[in-house]
Amino acid sequence: MSYKTILVHIDESRHTPEHIKVAAAIAGKCGAHLVGMAATALPGAFYLPGALGEGVTVTAYLAYLRERAEAALLVFEATVQELGVSSYEVRIIDDEAAVGISLHSRTSDLVVVGQLDPDESLPAVRTDFPEYVVMNSGRPTLIVPYGRQFETIGKRAIIAWDGGVEASRAVSAAIPLLQHAESVQVVIFATKSGHDTHGTRPGAELLPHLVRHGVHAELAAHTLSAGIANGEALLAHANDYHADLMVMGGYGHSRFREVLLGGVTQTVFNEMSVPTLMTH
């Protein structure tokens, strides 16, 4: 089991070179083909008459966006060549980034995107971009925190385990990375009420499953007192463990809006400091 195709989102963010390095490192580790994908188009509302300003045509504006996308992909090509990636390609999609990346990632084994930096303004990227990709791509998504550099990815990994469907999918999706890890910890945060999905032996059943995949892990179980948020506790544990990869399920309910996230998931999206692999 290994990743064979990895897709990384490319844009003009100053953090994009780090996203490329992370994706390239995983591609090299797994012998995967790396696809750098940039999007050109803004949401459909911008095609309304006058939305772009007087005298600006949609054709001219899309040409401008394509030039920006092509420039971003030149950075991708230069970076992967410098890193010695043996198999890669570039693609431009004429679509809004979140929608386009979600659609095209479905023929990849892993998609790599960046956490949005609130100090950056990227006109072609929606404000819930990484959340949207997690909830709509159907593929495991690795979110890279902004403003940090990562010398290693997956050397020290933690699995946020609650026994749920989403967490189970995330573990299966992360196996190719976990197999290369030097240290893996299954982390459980139970409440004093005892009402959870962990079963009678919280997390214990996951350890032999991982061993059968060549992943040796230890269990770290915590009981939270009232008033302590799971998301904050999880991030604090990742920091204390010096983790360079976190694996967890992404929880959301599309019937209320396109992406409405559970509390733990939203906390991690907002405050993550560790590359986080999510599935939904």
Image (cartoon, rainbow, N blue to C red):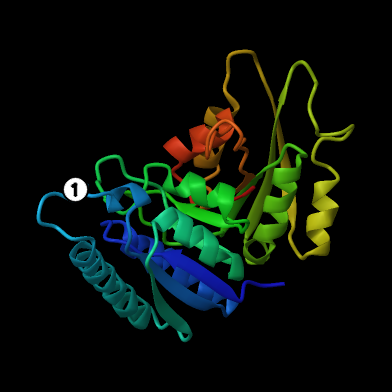
Examine the rendered structure and indicate whether residue 12 appears above or below residue 66: above
- Badge 1 local density, few (<14 within 10 Å), some, or many (20+)? few
Query: Residue 214 at x, y = what percent?
Result: 76, 65
Quarter holding residue 110 = bottom right
Q: Residue at x 60, y 27 (%)?
A: 230
Three-letter amino acid code at disc 1? Gly
Label 1, on which residue? Answer: 50
Task: Count numbered badges in the picture.
Answer: 1
Image quadrant containing the N terminus: bottom right
Question: Viewer-proximal residue, 167 or 275?
Answer: 167
Left or right of residue 163: residue 110: left
Q: Residue at x 54, y 41 (%)?
A: 238
Examine the rendered structure and indicate whether residue 187 appears above or below residue 68: above
Query: Can residue 241 be seen here?
Result: yes
Left or right of residue 144: residue 117: left
Quarter holding residue 231 = top right
Quarter holding residue 173 = bottom right
